[in-house]
């Protein structure tokens, strides 16, 4: 095993027993939700994975090590520390060599999960092609990572802060299977239907697991994106969320927000502008993705035999 990795006791035991493990990112904790709801949500997501027969492995960087699974104290500290680095593929090595504390985005979590031998990763939303990318060139490093690293990522689609048609085009170019779960439409985070058809549809965890194992047999690098619609009862109507999105986007432009700051700025402003309503829905959809992630991870264990 890679000697940069420190496994929590729980993940070590799951590895030894060969049972299902689901990776979780930490940027959603440090840059995606406010304290203390971020830590409460992270704990609830871990509990949901355990309740569905898998072991959670929240990933972060501390003290020159990649942590695969956090203790309660580590999770608490991460949720309250200011100036935690937001780590993508570009920053991971620098954070480790400097011995700083860093939270992993989708891209960096995929890299670390793959190093740790974990095939499945559940989160809320992924980064994508930003609106206006034709001039800003702002495309999340999450997208090329999906084309390179063999991890199945479960998300609720992507937020309407992004350009969804361009995001799907980019994923197609990189050869990433985009699989809507249980419906034809690509979901758009707070709403079940983006108005766009997903390239692929699967209705069971078994099909998604089989597809990942077939990709390995084909020798294809890269992962799969499973787009799991938010539960009906937690959906927020487009007309309710759109004003907050538009205002957040225009404030970001007016304040010259750029590069790594764009996504955290928009997420935070949307929570503020919707007075927490979007946060409750956000937590509900992550829990929903955790359940599907546990089911897919268990299927992979069964099908591998
Ligand atoms: N989108 C969300 N919630 C999130 C993120 C994106 O709806 O928490 C976080 C994830 O960690 C994702 C990162 O990997 O933001 C993408 O940042 P960027 O757009 O700077 O690549
Ligand atoms: Mn960006």
Image (cartoon, rainbow, N blue to C red):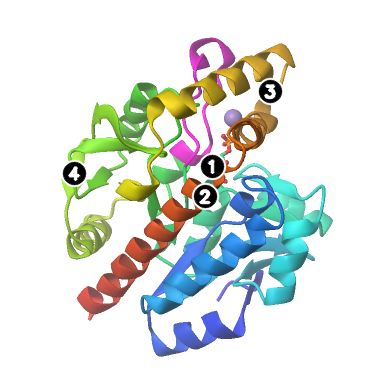
Query: Is 182 one of the magenta-colored residues?
Result: no
Circles 2 and 1: CB atoms closer than 8 Å: yes
- Establish whether ligand 1 lies closer than 8 Å to the Cβ of label 1: no
Asked whether 188 or 281 is in front, the reply is 281
Question: Is residue 228 visible from the viewing direction of this image?
Answer: no
* Disc 2: which residue: 280
**Residue position marked by numbered label 3 in the rendering:** 258
* Residue in the image at 74% along x and 16% along y: 255
Mark 3 vs mark 2, foreground winner is 2
Which of marks 1 and 4 precedes in the sequence? 4
Q: Position of residue 61 (x, y in %)?
A: 70, 61
Position of the C terminus, as image quadrant, is bottom left
Neighbourhood count class around disc 1 (C-alpha, 10 Å): few under 14, some 14–19, many 20 upward: some
Q: Position of residue 157 (x, y in %)?
A: 38, 40
Residues rendered magenta in the picture: 126-143
Which image quarter holds the N terminus?
A: bottom right
Sequence-wise first label, 1 or 3: 3
Helix, strand or loop at label 3? It is loop
Look at mark 4 in the image and give the residue it sits on: 183
Q: Is residue 32 above or below residue 111?
A: above
């Amino acid at each position: 095993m890679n000697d940069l990795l420190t496994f929590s006791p729980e993940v070590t035991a799951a590895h030894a027993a060969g049972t299902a493990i689901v990776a979780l990112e930490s940027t959603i904790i440090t840059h995606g939700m406010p304290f203390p709801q971020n830590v409460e949500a992270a704990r609830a997501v871990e509990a949901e994975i355990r309740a569905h027969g898998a072991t959670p492995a929240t990933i972060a960087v501390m003290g020159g090590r990649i942590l695969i699974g956090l203790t309660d104290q580590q999770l608490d500290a991460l949720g309250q520390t200011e100036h935690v680095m937001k780590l993508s593929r570009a920053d991971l090595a620098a954070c480790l060599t400097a011995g700083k504390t860093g939270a992993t985005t989708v891209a960096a979590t995929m890299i670390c999960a793959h190093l740790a031998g974990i095939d499945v990763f559940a989160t809320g939303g992924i980064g994508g092609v930003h609106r206006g990318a034709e001039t800003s060139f702002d495309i999340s490093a999450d997208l090329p990572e999906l084309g390179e690293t063999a991890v199945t990522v479960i998300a609720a689609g992507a937020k309407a802060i992004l350009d969804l048609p361009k995001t799907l085009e980019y994923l197609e170019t990189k050869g990433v299977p985009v699989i809507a779960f249980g419906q034809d439409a690509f979901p758009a985070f707070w709403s079940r239907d983006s108005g766009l058809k997903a390239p692929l549809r699967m209705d069971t965890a078994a099909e998604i697991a089989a597809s990942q194992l077939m990709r390995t047999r084909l020798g294809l690098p890269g992962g799969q994106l499973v787009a799991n619609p938010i539960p009906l009862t937690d959906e927020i109507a487009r007309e309710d969320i759109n004003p907050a999105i538009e205002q957040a986007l225009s404030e970001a432009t007016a304040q010259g927000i750029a590069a790594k700051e764009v996504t955290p700025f928009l997420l935070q402003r949307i929570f503020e502008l919707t007075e927490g309503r979007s946060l409750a829905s956000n937590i509900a959809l992550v829990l929903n993705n955790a359940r599907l992630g546990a089911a897919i991870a268990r299927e992979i264990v069964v099908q591998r035999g």
